[in-house]
Image (tube, rainbow, N blue to C red):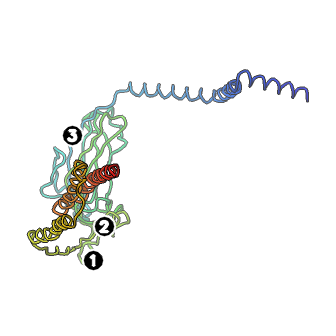
């Protein structure tokens, strides 16, 4: 065993010296590919089956449906629990406005019917056939009714979908919430080229009255409605602006503050200040004093009307120029000494 170990060690060392890590990387890669080969084969087969399914599905022609004969019927309950037709209205466009408004109460029933043409046979049932009634003031509250499907009696390849709405069906989903509801119908199927979606007028719902003749109270707001409900309105009176003096008074005061600057220049001249060497550095001195005057001008302009955020970059640039000009002026004076 010791001899085998030494021979293997020499071969490994020779492989590393001759080929670096490439030999080991190649062996590891080949092992990884051999272990992944079954998975790659399965993935290839699944992709092929999916492509064949998509190709066969695309070859099937989608059904181009047409919707017509949309009618809204209102039935009233008469003695003996017999429902009789009260009114019927054809709907030609969406959205529409019902005039007079459609009322739904405990003794009435609403039926919305429509004809779907272009189907293969009358036995087909669309996967989605839904009438949604959404409360106008509380959109989070919505009741849904599934339509009944049957084949047309005289038209081949035509379906008749009927949605039946009662106050009991609404109360079972969202409680005794009275008021106006927006009606929306959706008819869709994976075999249809397009889906049918239409919005109809509002329906006024009045639930069963209490014993004293009053309408039942609306259900309380749930957590989602409370979170997104409008906040109560509040009023706030801002503090009135402080009365300021006229602009002329402020300008006079500013001039009075600047007047001592002229007095300072007179005192400097009368005190015997040495200004003889000023002629030799006159250009540098002129630039320095001009930069100082520019700094003062920016400050005054800021005090008059310039905003603070616009003043900062201008004042920074002028201040840097004043500092540099003062540095060169002093440097020149030192050289003269």
Can you identify the residue that label 3 sits on?
68
Q: Is residue 43 above or below residue 116?
A: above
Identify the image quadrant of the N terminus.
top right
- Nearer to us in this view, 93 or 237: 237
Nearest to N terminus: mark 1 or mark 3? 3
- Nearer to us in this view, 115 or 264: 264
Residue lying farthest bottom? 212
Contact between labelled residues 3 and 2, with CB atoms less than 8 Å apart: no
Can you identify the residue that label 2 sits on?
176
Residue drawn at the location 27% of the way across and 39% of the way down: 116
Can you identify the residue that label 1 sits on?
211
- Nearer to us in this view, 249 or 276: 276
Label 3: state its secondary structure: strand
Which tag is nearer the camera, tag 2 or tag 3? 2
Report whether residue 151 is seen: yes
> Is residue 173 left or right of 67 when viewed as pictured?
right
Label 1: state its secondary structure: loop
Q: Quadrant of residue 319?
A: bottom left
Q: Quadrant of residue 118?
A: top left
Label 2: state its secondary structure: loop
Q: Quadrant of residue 167?
A: bottom left
Contact between labelled residues 3 and 1, with CB atoms less than 8 Å apart: no
Q: CA distance from mark 1 to mark 3?
A: 43 Å
Q: CA distance from mark 2 to mark 3?
A: 33 Å
Coordinates of residue 67 in the picture (x, y in percent): 24, 39
Coordinates of residue 48 in the picture (x, y in percent): 51, 25
């Amino acid at each position: 065993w010791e001899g085998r170990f030494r021979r293997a060690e020499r071969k490994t060392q020779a492989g590393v010296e001759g080929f670096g890590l490439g030999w080991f990387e190649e062996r590891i890669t080949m092992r990884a590919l051999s272990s992944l080969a079954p998975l790659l084969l399965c993935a290839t087969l699944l992709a092929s089956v999916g492509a064949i399914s998509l190709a066969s599905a695309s070859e099937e022609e989608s059904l181009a449906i047409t919707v017509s004969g949309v009618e809204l019927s209102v039935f009233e309950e008469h003695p003996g629990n017999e429902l009789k037709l009260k009114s019927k209205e054809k709907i030609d466009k969406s959205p529409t406005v019902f005039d007079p408004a459609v009322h739904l109460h405990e003794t009435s029933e609403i039926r919305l019917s429509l004809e779907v043409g272009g189907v293969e046979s009358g036995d087909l049932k669309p996967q989605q056939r839904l009438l949604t009634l959404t409360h106008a003031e509380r959109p989070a509250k919505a009741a849904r009714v599934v339509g009944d499907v049957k084949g047309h009696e005289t038209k081949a390849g035509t379906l008749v979908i009927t949605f039946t709405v009662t106050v009991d069906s609404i109360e079972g989903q969202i409680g005794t919430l009275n008021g106006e509801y927006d009606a929306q119908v959706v008819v869709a199927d994976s075999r249809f080229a397009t889906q049918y979606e239409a919005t109809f007028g509002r329906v006024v719902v009045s639930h069963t009255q209490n014993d004293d003749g009053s309408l039942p109270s609306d259900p309380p707001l749930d957590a989602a409605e409370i979170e997104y409900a409008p906040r109560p309105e509040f009023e706030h009176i801002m503090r009135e602006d402080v009365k300021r003096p006229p602009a002329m008074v402020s300008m006079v005061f500013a001039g009075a503050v600047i007047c001592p600057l002229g007095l300072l220049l007179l005192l400097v001249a009368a005190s015997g200040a040495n200004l003889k060497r000023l002629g030799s550095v006159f250009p540098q001195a002129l630039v320095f004093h001009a930069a100082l005057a520019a700094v003062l001008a920016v400050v005054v302009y800021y005090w008059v009307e310039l905003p603070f955020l616009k003043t900062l970059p201008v004042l920074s640039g002028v201040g840097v120029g004043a500092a540099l000009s003062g540095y060169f002026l002093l440097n020149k004076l030192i050289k003269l000494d």
